[in-house]
Amino acid sequence: MKANDDRVAVFVYGALLCHPRTRAEGVIASVADHSVAFTVRGITRFEPSFASLDPAPGRRAWGALVHYTPAEWARIRRDELSYRVITVEAVTAEGGMVAAQAFSVLETHRARGCGPSARYAGLLRQGAQGLGLPPEVVAQYAALERGGSRLSSYALPWLKPLLMPLVRRVHARLRPRPATRTPAPGKSG
């Protein structure tokens, strides 16, 4: 699961395809018997769904293999509250197999029957093109981009600065806090 320099191997397939680390160091990879499915519930009309790595016998999910420091990976994981982390066998374009971590939707956040917004599908298309993923993957994301809701594309540029302070406060409250030591009765800290 870790590279020689103690970095965490991660298979990315969603918006992380556009992460600066992925663009700079990502290696084309795939995971057998899985698909990139839009099964993470989002905000209706704005961002109806997000990508998840879901089991799909006989299919192949395409993305990139990226190595993060443990601190970077912990930061990314903290912000992805709709996912659990699974371990998969990623196959690089050169044929190497790497045990990697990946996000998969929590059942409590599963969406059914809705595609992504045009904005989100566009991010995936850009990331897939930039990495050189197979043309059919790029075409799939382009088709989803053409057919997706455009509401987030119009609203997000002015809504994001207004909502980010609220989102940060909510995330801070949802993050697990480290356990605190309580002194034994009759003793002070």
Image (spheres, rainbow, N blue to C red):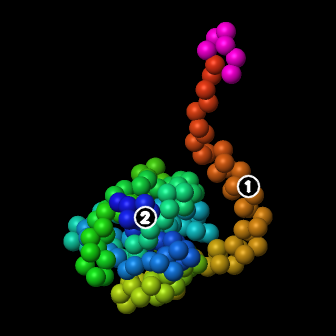
Please, what secondary structure does the residue beneath circle 1 have? helix
* Residue 41 shown left or right of residue 168 in the figure: left
Q: Nearer the viewer, mark 2 or mark 1?
A: 2
Instruction: Find residue 77 and name its label.
Output: none
Q: Which residues are magenta?
A: 184-189
Dot 1 crowding, Cα within 10 Å, few <14, some 14–19, many 20+: few
Amino acid type for the residue under numbered disc 1: Leu
Image height check: is 42 above or below 137? above
Q: Position of residue 71 (x, y in %)?
A: 54, 57
Q: Is residue 148 visible?
A: no
The residue singled out by tag 1 in the image is 166
State the residue position of label 2. 5
Please say if 189 is above or below 38.
above
Amino acid type of disc 2? Answer: Asp
Question: Gap between marks 2 and 1, in whole Å?
Answer: 37 Å
Q: Residue furthest front?
A: 5
The one of 111 and 180 positioned closer to us in this rendering = 180
Residue at the spot x=71%, y=50% of the render?
Answer: 169
Q: Could you say which quadrant of the image residue 123 lies in? A: bottom right
Residue 81: image x %, image y %? 53, 53
Q: Are marks 2 and 1 in contact (CB under 8 Å)?
A: no
Screen quadrant of the N terminus? bottom left
Quarter of the image containing the C terminus? top right
For the residue carrying disc 2, how many other residues have a C-alpha within 10 Å: few (<14), some (14-19), or many (20+)?
few
**Most foreground residue, 15 or 42:** 15
